[in-house]
Image (tube, rainbow, N blue to C red):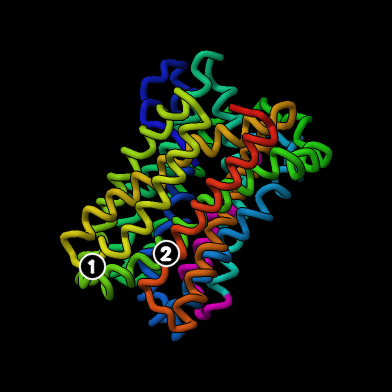
Amino acid sequence: MTTTLTAGRIKTGHKARWALVALGIGAFGIGLTEFVIMGLLVEVAQSLSVSVPSAGLLISGYALGVTFGGPLLTLATARLPHRNVILALMAIFILANVLCAIAPSYGLLMLGRVISGVAHGTFFGVGVVVAQSLVPPERKASAIALVFTGLTLATVLGLPFGTELGQAFGWRATFWSVSGIGLLALAASALSLPAGTHGETQANWRSLARLLRGAPLLALATTTLGYAGVFLVFTYIAPILTEVSAVAPSHVSRYLLLFGAGIVVGNLLGGRLADRGLRPALLGTLAGLAAVILAMRLGMGNPAAAMISLFLFGAAAFSTLAPLQAFMLRQSQGASTELASTLNISAFNLANAIGAAIGGSAITAGWGLGSLFPLGATMPALAVLLTLLTFKSREDS
């Protein structure tokens, strides 16, 4: 999930550039379908006659599809041509979003969300490998960054504009739009992706078992705890803005742009901090995230303060991504990079599911939207403690 925005500097063959752009378009569509539901919870709940917490579970369903379906599908397709895998995943993604757009019931909408999530996890695991194969060794990181720039742009631009589209023309229109982006990515991938590359033999059940114990498992737990607090709050950001901050529903998408601006700043900051020193970067960004979420209890009290709070929230949330990814890769040396990357994406999405479910339970229990902030801050605070224990046990730095 992490990247910087310097990937546009890649200098490689014409066809390789188009292949990277195609992967970026796919990442944009997948990122949009993951996050845009958060800005449309109220509309979806009213349309399907369910509660807002029940609508929030649509986020959890997607996240669980990524968490459990992604690694399994990555294993199942490990020896297939990468081009075929990417094309099949985009076709599944399109059909799943069409199902969401036409779903007459909550159950079918949930099914479409889960299927989309399964495609998400494997797309990024395989997409990273494809991107690396397209460029010289000295350009591999930049190629990966270009792919994940699509995901970043989905959050920065797609989320607010997708929310506005859904509010203006109905939430189903947003899913139709995402399906159209999927068609564009499918066509671009079919025209530009090379046909010769296959999956790596390291991506097997033995490698998966190695990544699910010891230090790698602690790293995955740190990612899950660290990011659960983000989704505990962000899942319900639309009702928080309208009910706590007194923001007009028609202005919610504009406030989300500020969150997106914070994402860009935090993403760049987190990468630079991780390059300078992983341990202080990881501890510092997680502690900073906990502090920002806790401060939002007061900072979301009015529309003006909410602007500042959302920017800081986006910056704090995404400043953790590069350190968390680097931490996972450091603890997973010798195992499949493809699987380690997919599992870390799964950990982020497990955090999504856990955060959304805890937040929904707090609202259902009558604790109110204000309770989400101290609950959310608790998660990265616990991740700080787990990180300290992991570094101490490994004598890592």
Q: Amino acid at mark 2?
A: Pro
Q: Residue 374, which numbered label?
A: 2
Instruction: Mark 1: give few (<14), some (14-19) or many (20+) Cα within 10 Å.
Output: some
Residue at the spot 50% in from the left edge and 77% down from the top edge: 54
Q: Nearer the viewer, residue 273 or 53?
A: 273
The number of numbered discs placed on residues in the rendered structure image is 2
The quadrant holding residue 38 is: bottom left
Q: Secondary structure at mark 2?
A: helix
Q: Which residues are magenta?
A: 84-107
Residue 351, how many percent across, how many down? Answer: 55, 56
Q: Nearer the viewer, residue 363 or 239?
A: 363
Drawn side of residue 84 relative to residue 236, left or right? right
In the displayed structure, 138 sits above or below 320; it is: above
Instruction: Mark 2: give few (<14), some (14-19) or many (20+) Cα within 10 Å.
Output: some
Residue at the spot 41% in from the left edge and 40% down from the top edge: 319
Q: Is residue 91 magenta?
A: yes
Residue 165, how many percent across, how many down? Answer: 29, 63
Contact between labelled residues 1 and 2, with CB atoms less than 8 Å apart: no
Q: Nearer the viewer, residue 7 or 340?
A: 340
Residue under numbered circle 1: 301
Residue at the spot 51% in from the left edge and 44% down from the top edge: 186
Q: Amino acid at mark 1?
A: Gly
